[in-house]
Image (tube, rainbow, N blue to C red):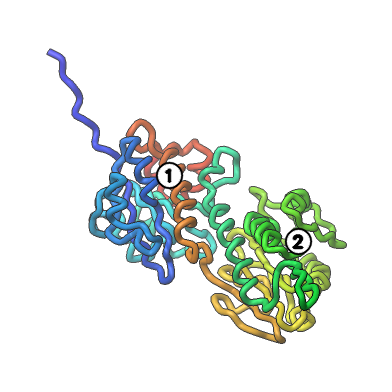
Amino acid sequence: METSEAPQDPVVIGVPRETVGGERRVSLIPETVQRLTGTGVKVVVESGAGEKAFFSDEAYRSAGAEIASRAQVFGGSQIVAKVQAPTLEEVAELKPGTILISFLDKGRDIDAIEALRKRDVVAFSFNSVPRITRAQSMDAMSSMSTVGGYKAVLLAANAVGRFFPLLMTAAGTVAPARVFVIGAGVAGLQALATARRLGGVTEAFDTRPAVREQVQSVGATFVEMPLQLEGTEGEGGYAREMEEEFLLRERKAIHDPVVKADVVITTAMIPGKRAPVLIEEDTIKAMRPGSAIVDLAAEAGGNTELTVPGETITVHGVTILAPFNLPSSLPVHASQMYSRNVAAVIGLLVKDGKINLDPEDEIIRGACLTGLEVKA
């Protein structure tokens, strides 16, 4: 007589509500949930998790998710997908052996990472996903940088007190705004493209010579600097930390383009480090009154000497905006993009209905900050 194996319980993916103040994104949206449940996994969503991003509980139910309490989401899920790094209270709610997917910065989330390690949680960090072709669909850092670069230009346009485009009016010709972007990563390139769409004259500088063509591809001018730029690109294509002597020369070199600009957007970041200070007070003092700086490196300390992280100030007639968490201000599309990144990670971790945490996989090995040795 033939016997059949008992059906295998599905892998359960948990989506908790974000608790960090001001966070409006959600880790999985209904559209993505529907695709995931179609592959055989079960998705459990905390009631109200998507409300701030305009995704209702009913929309999740219609997509095949189960709406549950917070305790059920944390206690009954094998994989928990979040946006923000977990609080210590949230770490305590996770079962040992759970896989957590979220942003986790090795330089700023030290306490959370250590707590996750002690809890035997496998922490998959989007901050540490290797920049390789196979991992592009999991690159949430780039996704959120796209949102931040776009929104930075809108904030600047609102703060600068002048039109962006060239206008021919009955009152005469209005000159276009000059926009200078420091750092031509994903955020910087998106800022350049958005500023150009609004009609601004765009320029950019980056210490990595390889990005010159990318800057030009979005219609901007790459500002040549009298600096030795070789060796400025670090691991994964990011800018690497430079010596203070180099930074001193860089500050002098960018002085004139900053002073001539109506809008300056700074994006210079070093993974796991404090952001480099590139614009000194003397340079800001020389800018035209009414100009604006949007400092996208605020959460890492900021790129200007006068930046007050999380605040908007006006000094020497220049408005300096240093916003936190810009992607959260566009929660619908930010959540959509992030959700697709999370789904790609789940596709890597779940094979044939089972969790497959392969420590030999380059992405898993690079992105899992804790617990990999436990699960391997």
Pick the quarter of the image with the C terminus.
Answer: top left
Q: Is residue 244 visible?
A: no
Q: Residue at x 48, y 56 (%)?
A: 333
Q: Position of residue 294 (x, y in %)?
A: 64, 71
Q: Which mark is residue 278?
A: none
Q: Residue furthest bottom?
A: 316
* Rendered residue at 57%/53% (across/down): 142
Q: Amino acid at mark 1?
A: Ala
Q: Is residue 366 visible?
A: yes
The residue identified by callout 1 is 343
Residue 49 sits in quarter: bottom left
Question: How far across and how far down the image is residue 322, in percent?
Answer: 59, 74
- Residue sitting at 53 percent across and 66 percent down? 326
Question: Residues under labels 1 and 2: Cα distance?
Answer: 34 Å
Q: Secondary structure at mark 2?
A: strand
Left or right of residue 126: residue 180: right
- Farthest residue in the left direction? 1
Q: Nearer the viewer, residue 44 or 246?
A: 44
Judging by the rendered image, the residue that carries numbered circle 2 is: 204
